[in-house]
């Protein structure tokens, strides 16, 4: 039923402006829930929130819980009680504590049949009260709660005490609603302890007191779970109650172990399956369970007993059941891997559990479309190998003998699970499913890396032999998914493991050109595999001729943009000193794809970085010519754009070209050639190619700035070109300092920009580090001018600033702090004193 609108009540944001009565609270609630005006709602919300904190709230909350009130009003009354008890307990006189407890118990009994939201808030309020009074004022709180909601036993003539609840089936909770209310109360009690703010000592005291009451709760839960005629709703509440209590580190042995076995029995009930899974996983995932080794060992047969149900679920495509059973197996196997490995006398049981998890990994179907279980197991395989390898040598050798065959099977399974579906099926997948599959393959890649720690070189040999068999087979071409999966395995390992000493990599490099690339996914993986071997290729440069042509073929295809560009960049970075024979082809193809705009802007930046690495290793006398050929078309385009009227399209193009120059100058570093060899131009007599280019385009860049000086993004892109150049060139940047200084002054004078200040911080830091004498001279000349930079600064303060700045040559942040302090002094604001003493 709907809340009947009372007379319109105009609320002030302050509670004191309106009497805190039952009627006014109801009017405010109506305004909050039903008034269409958001301003009115906000005022009501604020008024009600403040009303809950008032002293009168202890009184007006009870009428709101009347049986004639609407659920929204009753809920507010119950919430108000919880607020007052949890946050304003000290306001309540001690002699009223007992009365409040009895009132709450009475109302919980009344609301045991609902509404559920009101019942829960009342239970939380009583839980909060219990936490304030346990153990001094209410030492047996849980026992008393059970006693209150326990009906009289027919024929007994009396009521049993709370301590008798564990008696052999004597307790009967025929009142269904009271039973549910009791279970709700027992469930929220530990949860309230976890969520409330308490001093650490008090929290520990309460945890100990509640854990002592577990001897009351455990038998009650066991009795209800074992009672065949008990409704599923009651059993589900029992399971949730156990999940709440296990967070208190209750012991897992004794009757608790029996209760956990009851939870396994509940898995056979479809209505209870999901809740039982959550409870079991919660219970056995507690690290504290490792103290109860015997209980963990006793759980293994129960988990293994689910294997037939798991197989049936996998066969029937029942993902919910297979998912749940897998979670239980992984929770036991992963959380307690080392503990169970140490139980040598039970090694066969744990091996069976490992094989059960292996079955979960191999569940048929493509993740995430037709199965979602296998992903749950991947971290287990890392944990197991980590624990095995952590043992001392003798025991580790034994475990490796036992588990190596399992990990060999795991390799086959992981490669199978990484298979792409057919192209027709893959097209039908949603973008979300494709992204989840991509992440899943990343997880498989990480897992294969861990598998390598167990199998070592045998894994690479295994992959190589299988790939060779596929590519050399005479009965017909292999499925591209099989080839792609094996390459994916190689790539996963080579990305993180040093394969320089592997004897199969030369054979792999020789096999790659034999691959018939029929689709994008396979081509991408071929590119990434080559990229992962870039460091190996640097040590074996004769093999570059096998792969560079393939990479350049991929570079001209837009659909391979990311993989081909990133691979070329890696090869140029790692193998730069051996790429001279391939440089003409690399430069020609790169210039062509840039001219045709095949790649997106970010890939163009990567490509320019790769070309910077390549050019850095060429003979100095060749660099300028190749550099000019590379960037001239883009400089010409920039010149055209500089004469056009500003527009969004023009802006993006300008930023793109400036970004490419920045990327190129980031990696084009010829300082490694300064030592020189015979025939190399001496460093002191040559001009760095970057400086030559910057001097040629400086006027053009000024023309661009003349139209875009007020645009922060364009100014940032311009500053980025010089910022990267300064970091790369260092001393060689000296010829550009006067022009750049003048340009920065113009930028900041006309339209101050943060990027210009950042670049200035960078002409100063580099000058201080690499041209220390010159900077010292310039600072003296500038700072000794009377009245500069302001008349408020003394010559002594100028000298202090000069000394501090010149002393700091390694930490840019410290330089910024020194300059900021001097800036405050110049403006008459007292900065921190004794700055240099802090470092």
Image: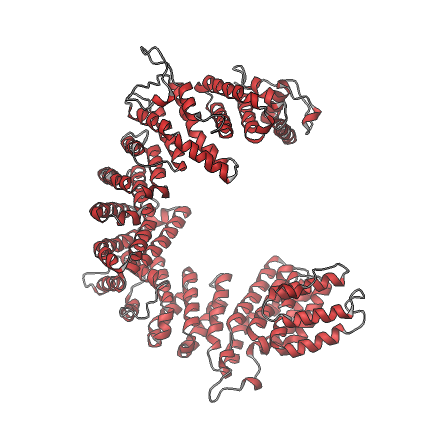
- Coloring basis for residues: secondary structure
Residue found at x 58% / y 82%: 687
Look at the image and tell me whether residue 646 can be seen. Answer: no
Q: Is residue 546 left or right of residue 475?
A: right
The vertical placement of 620 against 494, above or below, is below
Looking at the picture, does residue 24 appear above or below residue 797? above
Position of residue 644 measured from the top left corner of the image (x, y, whole percent) = 64, 64
* Rendered location of residue 381, percent (x, y): 31, 52
Q: Is residue 6 left or right of residue 99?
A: right
Is residue 277 depicted above or below 113 in this figure?
A: below
Q: Is residue 347 visible?
A: yes
Quadrant housing residue 10: top right
Q: How many numbered badges does the structure rendering display?
A: 0
Which sits in the foreground, 134 or 550?
134
| Quarter of the image with the C terminus in it | bottom right
Name the residue rendered at 54%, 27% in the picture.
82
Nearer to us in this view, 609 or 532: 532
Give the camera-side residue of 798 and 542.
798
- Residue located 24% across and 46% down the image: 350
Camera-side residue: 293 or 280? 293
> What percent of the width, then of the height, locates residue 151?
38, 15
Return the residue found at the far bottom. 678
Coordinates of residue 29 in the picture (x, y in percent): 60, 24
Q: Quadrant of residue 559?
A: bottom left
At 68% across and 21% down in the image, what residue appears? 19
Considering every residue shown, the one lying at the far front of the view is: 136
């Amino acid at each position: 039923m709907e809340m009947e609108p009372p007379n319109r009540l105009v609320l002030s944001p302050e509670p004191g402006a309106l009497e805190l009565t039952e009627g006014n609270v109801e009017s405010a609630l109506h305004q909050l829930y039903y008034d269409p005006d958001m301003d009115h709602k906000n005022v009501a919300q604020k008024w009600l929130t403040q009303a809950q904190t008032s002293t009168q709230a202890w009184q007006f909350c009870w009428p709101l819980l009347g049986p004639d009130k609407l659920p929204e009003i009753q809920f507010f009354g119950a919430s108000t009680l919880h607020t007052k008890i949890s946050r304003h307990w000290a306001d309540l006189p001690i002699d009223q504590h007992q009365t409040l407890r009895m009132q709450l118990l009475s109302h919980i009994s009344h609301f045991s049949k609902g509404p559920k939201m009101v019942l829960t808030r009342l239970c939380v309020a009583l839980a909060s009260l219990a936490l304030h009074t346990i153990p001094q004022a209410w030492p047996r709180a849980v026992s008393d709660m059970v006693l209150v909601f326990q009906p009289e036993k027919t024929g007994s003539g009396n009521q049993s005490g709370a301590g008798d609840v564990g008696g052999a089936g004597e307790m009967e909770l025929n009142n269904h609603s009271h039973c549910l209310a009791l279970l709700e109360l027992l469930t929220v009690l530990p949860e309230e302890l976890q969520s409330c703010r308490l001093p650490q000592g008090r929290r520990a005291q309460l945890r100990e007191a509640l854990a002592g009451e577990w001897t009351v709760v455990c038998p009650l839960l066991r009795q209800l779970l074992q009672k065949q005629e008990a409704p599923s709703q009651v059993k589900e509440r029992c399971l949730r109650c156990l999940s709440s209590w296990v967070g208190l580190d209750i012991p897992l042995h004794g009757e608790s172990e029996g209760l956990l076995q009851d939870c396994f029995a509940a898995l056979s009930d479809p209505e209870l399956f999901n809740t039982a899974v959550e409870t079991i996983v919660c219970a056995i995932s507690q690290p504290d369970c490792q103290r109860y080794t015997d209980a963990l060992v006793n759980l293994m047969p129960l988990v293994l007993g689910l294997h037939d149900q798991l197989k049936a679920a996998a066969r029937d495509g029942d993902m919910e059941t297979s998912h749940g059973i897998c979670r239980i197996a992984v929770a036991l196997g992963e959380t307690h891997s080392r503990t169970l490995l140490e139980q040598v006398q039970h090694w066969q049981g744990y091996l069976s559990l490992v094989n059960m998890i292996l079955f979960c990994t191999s569940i048929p179907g493509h993740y995430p479309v037709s199965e979602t279980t296998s992903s749950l197991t991947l971290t287990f395989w890392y944990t197991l190998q980590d624990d095995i390898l952590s043992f001392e040598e003798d025991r580790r050798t034994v475990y490796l003998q036992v588990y190596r065959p399992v990990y060999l099977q795991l390799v086959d399974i992981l490669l199978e699970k990484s298979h792409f579906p057919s192209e027709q099926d893959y097209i039908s997948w949603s973008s979300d499913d494709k992204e989840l599959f991509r992440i899943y393959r990343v997880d498989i890649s990480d897992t294969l890396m861990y598998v390598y720690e167990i199998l070592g070189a045998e894994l690479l040999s295994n992959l190589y032999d299988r790939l060779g068999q596929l590519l050399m087979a005479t009965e017909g071409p292999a499925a591209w998914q099989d080839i792609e999966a094996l390459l994916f395995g190689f790539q996963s390992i080579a990305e993180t493991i040093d394969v320089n000493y592997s004897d199969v990599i030369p054979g792999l490099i020789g096999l790659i050109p034999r691959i018939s690339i029929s689709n994008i996914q396979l081509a991408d993986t071929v590119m990434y595999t080559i990229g992962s071997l870039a460091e190996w290729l640097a040590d074996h440069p004769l093999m570059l001729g096998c792969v560079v042509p393939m990479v350049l073929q991929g570079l001209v295809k837009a659909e391979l943009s990311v993989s081909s560009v990133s691979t070329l960049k890696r090869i140029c970075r790692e193998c730069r000193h051996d790429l001279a024979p391939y440089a003409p082809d690399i430069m020609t193809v790169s210039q062509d794809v840039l001219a045709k705009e095949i790649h997106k802007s970010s890939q163009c930046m990567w490509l320019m970085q790769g070309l910077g690495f390549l050019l850095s290793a060429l003979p100095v006398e060749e660099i300028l010519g190749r550099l000019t050929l590379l960037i001239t078309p883009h400089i010409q385009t920039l010149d055209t754009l500089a004469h056009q009227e500003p527009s969004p399209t023009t802006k993006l193009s300008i930023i793109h070209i400036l970004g490419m120059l920045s990327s190129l100058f980031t990696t084009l570093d010829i300082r490694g050639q300064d030592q020189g060899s015979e025939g190399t131009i001496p460093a002191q007599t040559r001009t760095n190619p970057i400086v030559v280019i910057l001097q040629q385009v400086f006027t053009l860049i000024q023309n661009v700035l003349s139209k875009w000086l007020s645009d922060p993004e364009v100014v940032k892109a311009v500053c980025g070109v010089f910022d990267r150049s300064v970091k790369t060139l260092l001393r060689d940047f000296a010829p550009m300092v006067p022009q750049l200084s003048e340009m920065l002054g113009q930028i900041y004078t006309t339209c101050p920009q943060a990027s210009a200040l950042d670049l200035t911080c960078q002409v100063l830091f580099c000058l201080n580090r690499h041209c220390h004498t010159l900077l010292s001279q310039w600072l003296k000349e500038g700072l000794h001018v009377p009245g500069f930079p302001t008349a408020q600064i003394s010559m002594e303060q100028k000298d202090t600033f000069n000394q501090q700045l010149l002393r700091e040559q390694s930490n840019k942040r410290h330089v910024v702090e020194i300059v900021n302090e001097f800036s405050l002094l110049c403006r008459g604001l007292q900065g921190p004193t004794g700055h240099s003493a802090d470092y």
